[in-house]
Amino acid sequence: MQLYPLKLVTVVGETVIMDDIAKEGVALGATGYTLAEVSGQGSRGARAEIMTGAAKTMKCEFVVPMDVAEKILRHVSHDYFEHYACIAWLSDVQVVRGQAYVSH
Amino acid sequence: MFTLPLAALCGQMPAVLAVLNADQFARILDSLERNLLTPIPLCFVLGIVCTRIHGGIRIPKELYLSIAIFLLMSIGFIGGHELAHEYHEHGVSTIWKPALATLLLGCVTPITSYLVLRYLCRFSIADSAGIAAHYGSTSAVTYAVANSFVEQTQHPANSFLPTLVTILECPGIAIALVLGAALSARERAAKAGATGKPVRESKLGEALYEVMTGQSIMLMAGLLVIGFISTLFMDPKGFQPFYDFFQSKGMLFRGCLCIFLLEMGLVAGERLGDLVKVGPALVAFGILMPLVHGFLGVYLGHVAGLNLGGCTVLGAIVASASYIAAPPAVRLTLPEANPTLSITAALAITFPFNIAFGIPIYFEMAKWVGAT
């Protein structure tokens, strides 16, 4: 089976910023994203969702080529790390139908 | 420059207290007792107690979200219905003054909150503006509790109070956020110059749009319009079932309010630990600022021609702080503000204070200024 080496960018952070991060990732060249509600504990604990029923923490994932991954990580670290509870990392992945993840 | 008039105001406090004689104190205590020992505040207390002793009450998310929808729709629909009657009988003559007073209060309270927080409590610009945004807006649940209180005391509020709640919701958040964003932009620009990093784009417009199109405004204002239109244009017999469902002689509404307050008690209970972190200045602010704003609301309400119940409820909603709409808006616009401060103040200090002590005090204030 043909697999394509790509990068998985994972951003976990407070819910209030995650929709924006997903959209900004697409603007930077990602072809799509996956958003999921998650739970956990971190060093900052700053949250704004009270009684709205929304999860306090969300995870956003992008499967992208290296150049886009770098752009997303740079953007997230510059715009969000200072003031928001947020963490981001990069992993190598082998993807089926890899062509779908490269925007034209 | 602002501390002088504030200090003068504080200097007046003993004189104000001296005006309250023993008889008035007895009346306030009596009102407190009548308010505190009723199911709505007691459910809130049960929630807090349950959290503190790690008890087993869990309100499913879907249930309290559904209840919030019902409460907001009910407030809006009944408000729209009563507004239509008021409009039919008096036109806009009885409504425009209270509406204008409410708008004025919505613009003044974020500014007074900001000045007190910044210059008396010495919080940073972002923290002061963030907390001020919460106190400039209002809490629909506080409205519901205040309205139930005045109904229980046989002094129902003017019919158009729900309209005033919707007027009060937005301007406070907007003014405080614009103020905070403008003032902290200078700091950010200076910092950007020093570090060489470009300034992050402000999300003020986006945050304000979300507040204005948020659930509480859309449901309450939407149902207000629906209630208003259907009262004017629908056959009364056809209208009755809708009215019965939303009004339900107050039964469904008050029962739902008990469940909602239980959930709020559970959430507030978790926040009680943060009281130690936020410091005495914010605790004092969370109690004293509502009293000042509440008095302003009661007084201006009286000047604008509201009745005793109406003045009480207006005082309560002006004194209340938002804890659902404001936090995400503040978080997006003023990221350097610490959300623990504002949420703890609004939810763990001011909300309990208002439903336990504030509302009966505003009721007595309303009597004191001569509302009938």
Image (tube, rainbow, N blue to C red):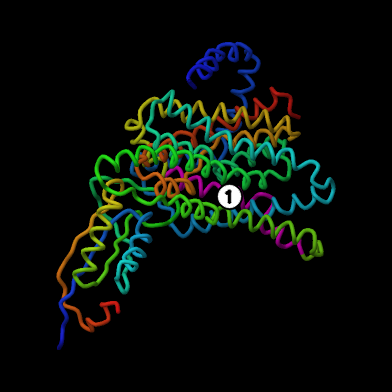
Q: Looking at the rendering, which quadrant does residue B344 occupy?
A: top left
Q: Looking at the rendering, which quadrant does residue B102 occupy?
A: top right
Task: Farthest residue to the bottom: give it.
Answer: A1
Type of amino acid under label 1: Gly
Q: In this rendering, is residue B96 above or below A72?
A: above
Q: Which residue is mark 1?
A: B255
Q: Residue at x 62, y 18 (%)?
A: B26
Image coords of residue B154 (percent x, y): 72, 36
Query: Is residue B255 highlighted in magenta?
Result: yes
Of B68 and B345, which appears nearest the observer?
B345
Dominant secondary structure, magenta: helix
The disc numbered 1 marks a residue on which chain?
A: B
Query: Is residue B165 highlighted in magenta?
Result: no
Of B351 and B183, which appears nearest the observer?
B183
Residues drawn in magenta: B239-266
Q: Is residue B143 left or right of residue B325?
A: right
Image coords of residue A84 (percent x, y): 31, 49
Q: In this rendering, is residue A7 above or below B196?
A: below
Within-10-Å neighbours for mark 1: few <14, some 14–19, many 20+: some
Q: Quadrant of the C terminus of chain B?
A: top right
Image coords of residue B27 (percent x, y): 64, 21
Q: Residue at x 61, y 35 (%)?
A: B105
Of B107 and B138, which appears nearest the observer?
B107
Task: Farthest residue to the right: give it.
Answer: B89
Q: Residue at x 26, y 62 (%)?
A: A72
Q: Looking at the rendering, which quadrant does residue B139 occupy?
A: top right
Q: Is residue B154 left or right of residue A26?
A: right
